[in-house]
């Protein structure tokens, strides 16, 4: 089973949690897109759902495939969000934001009664931090914000390069008009302390540590899909 097939199997298992009439948060990224494709087939067969996408990219795919959509303003309480992750630890704490949609992903997840994460087994780690931590920041005062992030991280014992995400030789811009700093801190022993420290920096809009939001993770490997709950 190749990597894409593993993503499809995880998405297929997540679809078993979707019920008629649900209001769904729909994530961003390659694994979430497999979920959208499978969901669209079920919608074509008569499943009635309303989706709230976490990015313009996901919105476009849903519209192209005929998945009915709403906004979080019109549908502020969701039954379930299905989304991917860049890393998952045993407590189901996550690093997200590799696709650049972390702010909207976190807002949608927080508005949901449940969040199910779908991923292949390569995303499982014992301690978060192998994947660079995305930090969404206001473009104004970028250098000052980067220095403040470095100082705050160093104060709690983590450090490493903090790079501005680029695309086509220009800064990557999120759907909300912000920049992303990718912080290669390595192992993060106290994710809550880092989360609190980053939130205290005025130029930080949001960060990619998703703590206490995921209820379950559906992990696929060569043997199929399995459900993991917090240790």
Image (cartoon, helix red, strand yellow):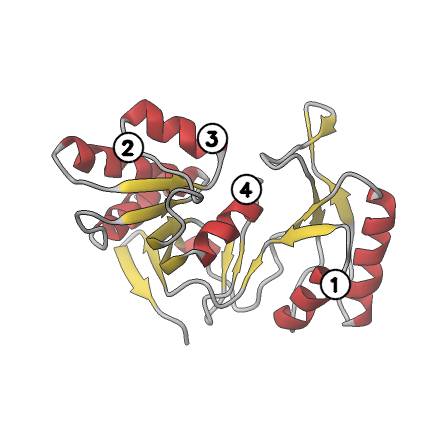
Kindly report the distance in space between the C-alpha atoms of the residues bearing marks 4 and 1. Answer: 21 Å
Instruction: Return the x and y of residue 164 as percentages of the image width and height.
Output: 75, 40
Does dot 2 land on a helix, a strand or a loop?
Answer: loop
Q: Front-most of 213 and 35?
A: 213
Q: Are marks 3 and 4 in contact (CB under 8 Å)?
A: yes
Disc 3 or disc 2, which is closer to the eye? 2
Disc 4 or disc 1, which is closer to the eye? 1
Is 15 left or right of 182, judged from the image as shown? Answer: left
Q: Front-most of 206 and 223?
A: 206
Task: Answer with the quarter of the image where residue 154 lies.
Answer: bottom right
Disc 1 or disc 3, which is closer to the eye? 1
The answer to whether any part of residue 2 appears in the image is: no
Report the residue marked by disc 2. Answer: 67
Instruction: Return the x and y of residue 70 as percentages of the image width and height.
Output: 36, 37
Relative vertical location of residue 185 with respect to residue 145 in this rendering, above or below: below
Q: Are marks 2 and 1 in contact (CB under 8 Å)?
A: no
Report the residue marked by disc 1. Answer: 200
Q: Earlier along the polypeptide chain: callout 4 or callout 1?
A: 4
Kindly report the distance in space between the C-alpha atoms of the residues bearing marks 3 and 2. Answer: 14 Å
Q: Earlier along the polypeptide chain: callout 3 or callout 4?
A: 3
**Residue at (58, 34) in percent of width and height:** 175
Query: Counting other residues with Cα less than 10 Å from the Cα at mark 2, is it few (<14), some (14-19), or many (20 or more)?
Result: many
Relative vertical location of residue 52 with respect to residue 120 in this rendering, above or below: above
**Residue at (51, 51) in percent of width and height:** 107
Report the residue marked by disc 3. Answer: 57
Report the residue marked by disc 4. Answer: 101
Q: Earlier along the polypeptide chain: callout 2 or callout 1?
A: 2
Kindly report the distance in space between the C-alpha atoms of the residues bearing marks 1 and 3. Answer: 30 Å
Which image quarter is the C terminus in? bottom left
Q: Earlier along the polypeptide chain: callout 1 or callout 3?
A: 3
**Residue at (66, 32) in percent of width and height:** 173
């Amino acid at each position: 089973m190749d990597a894409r097939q593993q993503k499809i199997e995880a998405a297929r298992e997540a679809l078993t949690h979707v019920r008629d009439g649900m209001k769904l948060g729909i994530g961003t990224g390659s694994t979430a897109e497999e979920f959208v494709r499978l969901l669209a087939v079920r919608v074509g067969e008569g499943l009635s759902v309303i989706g709230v996408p976490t990015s313009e990219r996901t919105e476009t795919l849903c519209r192209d495939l005929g998945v009915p959509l709403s906004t979080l303003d019109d549908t502020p309480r969701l039954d379930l969000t299905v989304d991917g992750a860049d890393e998952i630890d045993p407590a189901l704490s996550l690093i997200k934001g590799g696709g650049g949609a972390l702010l909207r992903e976190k807002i949608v997840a927080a508005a949901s009664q449940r969040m199910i994460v779908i991923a292949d087994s390569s995303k499982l780690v014992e301690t978060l931090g192998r994947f660079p931590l995305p930090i969404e920041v206001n473009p104004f005062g970028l250098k000052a914000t980067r220095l403040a992030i470095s100082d705050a991280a160093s104060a709690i014992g983590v450090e490493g390069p903090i790079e501005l995400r680029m695309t086509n030789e220009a800064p990557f811009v999120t759907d909300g008009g912000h920049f992303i700093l990718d912080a290669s801190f390595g192992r993060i022993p106290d994710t809550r302390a880092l989360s609190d420290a980053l939130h205290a920096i005025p130029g930080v809009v949001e960060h990619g540590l998703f703590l206490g939001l995921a209820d379950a993770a559906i992990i696929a490997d060569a043997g199929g899909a399995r459900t993991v709950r917090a240790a």
